[in-house]
């Protein structure tokens, strides 16, 4: 299973970016998907998650600004980021809980990360 994230870049404060993450490989069931971020010198934190049924959850600092969504047919999860601030600068990683065959437990897979830089 591979996760390929894209969409990062440099944006001014107040701007927007949309991240995408495509899951590929041997996937029987794609369960929860999510986005984490890690800023320089800080621990990785969960930013947003979405279940296979579309239930979402967000860290308080992004509520009202970020929206996570997914397209199950395309095996893709998105993160729409609006009203970005310099505090959102980080490497963003996508994750997915994947069952590779019927009857096996799901395992968490990670993408390589995409850098988001917000200038003031």
Image (cartoon, rainbow, N blue to C red):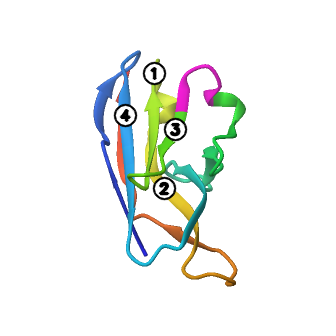
User: Which label sits in the foreground, 4 or 3?
Assistant: 3
Q: Residue at x 48, y 55 (%)?
A: 94
User: Which dot marks residue 8?
Assistant: none
Q: Residue at x 63, y 41 (%)?
A: 54
Q: Position of residue 48 (x, y in %)?
A: 61, 42
Q: Is residue 26 left or right of residue 38?
A: left
- The answer to whether residue 47 is above or below residue 21 is above
Q: Give whichever of 3, 11 is nearer the camera.
A: 3
Question: Would you name the residue on which mark 4 appears?
Answer: 18
Snapshot quadrant of residue 96: bottom right
Q: Position of residue 22 (x, y in %)?
A: 37, 57
Q: Which residues are magenta?
A: 62-67
How far is mark 4 from mark 1, CA to CA?
Answer: 9 Å
| Mark 2, secondary structure of its residue | strand
Q: Are marks 4 and 3 in contact (CB under 8 Å)?
A: no
Question: Would you name the residue on which mark 2 appears?
Answer: 94
- The answer to whether residue 77 is above or below residue 10 is below
- The answer to whether residue 116 is above or below residue 14 is below
Q: Is residue 58 left or right of residue 19?
A: right
Q: Position of residue 120 (x, y in %)?
A: 38, 20
How far is mark 2 from mark 4, CA to CA?
Answer: 13 Å
How far is mark 3 from mark 2, CA to CA?
Answer: 12 Å
Residue 85 shown in magenta = no
Q: Residue at x 66, y 46 (%)?
A: 53
Sequence-wise first label, 1 or 3: 3
Residue 66 shown in magenta = yes
Question: Would you name the residue on which mark 3 appears?
Answer: 69
């Amino acid at each position: 299973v591979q996760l390929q994230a894209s969409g990062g870049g440099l944006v001014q404060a107040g701007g927007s970016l949309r991240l995408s993450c495509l899951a590929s490989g041997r996937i029987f069931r794609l369960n929860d998907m999510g986005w984490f971020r890690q800023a320089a010198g800080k621990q990785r934190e969960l930013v947003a998650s979405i279940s296979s049924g579309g239930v979402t959850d967000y860290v308080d600092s992004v509520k009202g600004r970020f929206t996570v969504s997914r397209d199950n047919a395309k095996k893709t999860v998105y993160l729409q980021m609006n009203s970005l601030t310099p505090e959102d600068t980080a490497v963003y990683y996508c994750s997915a809980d994947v069952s590779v065959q019927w009857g096996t437990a799901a395992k968490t897979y990670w993408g390589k990360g995409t850098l988001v830089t917000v200038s003031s």
